[in-house]
Amino acid sequence: MNDRLQSWWDGLTPEQRVRASEIASRPSPRGMAIDDLSAAMIRAGLPTSRMVWTGQPEHLVEMLDEVADFVRGAARPR
């Protein structure tokens, strides 16, 4: 899984990395829109969870804890 996470992260644009970091820092559940960032996660084979429709379009997919933990670690300055 770590190889898939790293490959996914390496392929993100700087703007996508910022968005991923913002989403990863939210408390669970981490709702996110079906957009280029969530599509990249799905194409990379990363786990996501469909969220129950709330009437809000940004709450269609959830970034799971495992992905959020990786993003928070990868986004830290080294």
Image: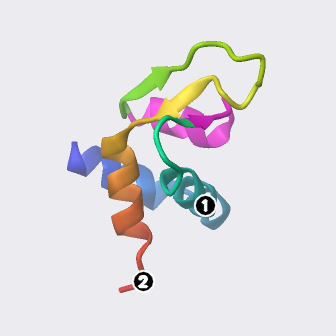
Highlighted magenta segment, given as a residue range: 31-44
Residue 47: image x %, image y %?
A: 36, 30
Kindly report the distance in space between the C-alpha atoms of the residues bearing marks 2 and 1: 17 Å
- The local crowd at label 2, few if under 14, some if 14 to 19, many if 20 or more residues have their Cα within 10 Å, is few
Q: Quadrant of the C terminus?
A: bottom left
Residue 59: image x %, image y %?
A: 65, 27
- Which of the 4 image quarters holds residue 37? top right
Q: Residue furthest top?
A: 53
- The answer to whether 12 appears left or right of 67 in the picture is right
- Which of the 4 image quarters holds residue 46? top left
Q: Quadrant of the N terminus?
A: top left
| Residue found 71% across the figure and 31% down from its top | 58
Which of the two discs, 2 and 1, sits closer to the camera? 2
Mark 1 lies on residue: 13
What amino acid type is highlighted by mark number 1? Thr
| Residue found 34% across the figure and 66% down from its top | 73
Of the two numbered discs 2 and 1 on the same chain, state the one appearing first in sequence: 1
- The answer to whether 78 appears left or right of 40 in the picture is left
What amino acid type is highlighted by mark number 2? Pro
Q: Residue furthest bottom?
A: 78
Above or below: residue 17 compared with residue 76: above
Label 1: element kind = loop
The residue nearer to you, when weighing 41 against 61, is 61
Above or below: residue 59 compared with residue 72: above
Above or below: residue 61 compared with residue 21: above
User: Magenta stretch: residue 33 in it?
Assistant: yes
Label 2: element kind = loop
Mark 2 lies on residue: 77
Residue 2: image x %, image y %?
A: 22, 50
Above or below: residue 53 compared with residue 35: above
Residue 8: image x %, image y %?
A: 42, 49
